[in-house]
Image (tube, helix red, strand yellow):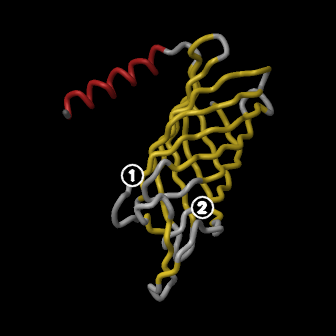
Amino acid sequence: MKKVLLMAIALFALGFANAQDMRFGVKAGLMISSYDQFAVDNDYGNYDYYNIYNSYYYGNGSNKSNVGIYVGGLVDFALVDKFRLQPELTLSVVPGDHGYVAIGVPVLAKYSFFDKFYAMAGPGLNYAVNADDDQFSPSFDIGASYDLMQDFYVEVRGDISLGGYLGSNIHAGVGYRF
């Protein structure tokens, strides 16, 4: 299994090396997270909640939002005419007593509808560094970016949690491509 994984990583890296239009970049911004440490899946598709005294009460969802920051790096390269691929590595921090630290690896396909505007979507895998269990949380990311100048861009993106420890997030930030 390790050999297969190493071979896949090597082929992925070789694909990056052969890309003609490849740019590295950095990004940072604010995020709003729906993460709630008290949520527990109740086998009915709903979430139940515990308060700080471990007293149980039933709820169909939490309206609690947490504000945090994210920073990361990316590789952006052209696939065909208007399509691009953008794998990323991000670090997300939601501060506070009930916050979290997570590492995210989304792989986004980008499509240019018109000059400087991109719609993007793709899978992501998030790892909660400070979690006790269920540390991996898959997500589906969808959003848009706009190139302000040749190297600077702004983006708005949501990642929809597909289960696991972390909730869904909304990201708004800026980036720079080298």
Indicate which disc, 2 or 1, sits on the residue closer to the N terminus. Answer: 2
Residue 170 drawn above or below residue 151: below
Where does the image place residue 81, in percent across and percent down from the top left?
65, 11
Q: Which quarter of the picture shows residue 43?
A: bottom left
Crowding around mark 2 (Cα neighbors within 10 Å: few <14, some 14 to 19, many 20+) is: some
Q: CA distance from mark 2 to mark 1?
A: 16 Å
What is the residue that sits farthest to the front in this orientation?
Answer: 44
Decide which of 32, 29 is in the foreground and name it: 32
Crowding around mark 1 (Cα neighbors within 10 Å: few <14, some 14 to 19, many 20+) is: some
What is the residue that sits farthest to the bottom in this orientation?
Answer: 53
Question: Which residue is drawn at the image coordinates 44% and 59% (left, top)?
Answer: 165
Q: Residue 103 got which mark?
A: none
Question: Which residue is drawn at the image coordinates 61% and 53% (left, top)?
Answer: 169
Residue 28 drawn above or below residue 79: below
Which residue does the numbered mark 1 point to in the structure image?
A: 136
Q: The disc labelled 2 sits on which kind of residue?
A: Ser
Q: Which quarter of the picture shows residue 65?
A: bottom right
Q: Residue 34 got which mark?
A: 2
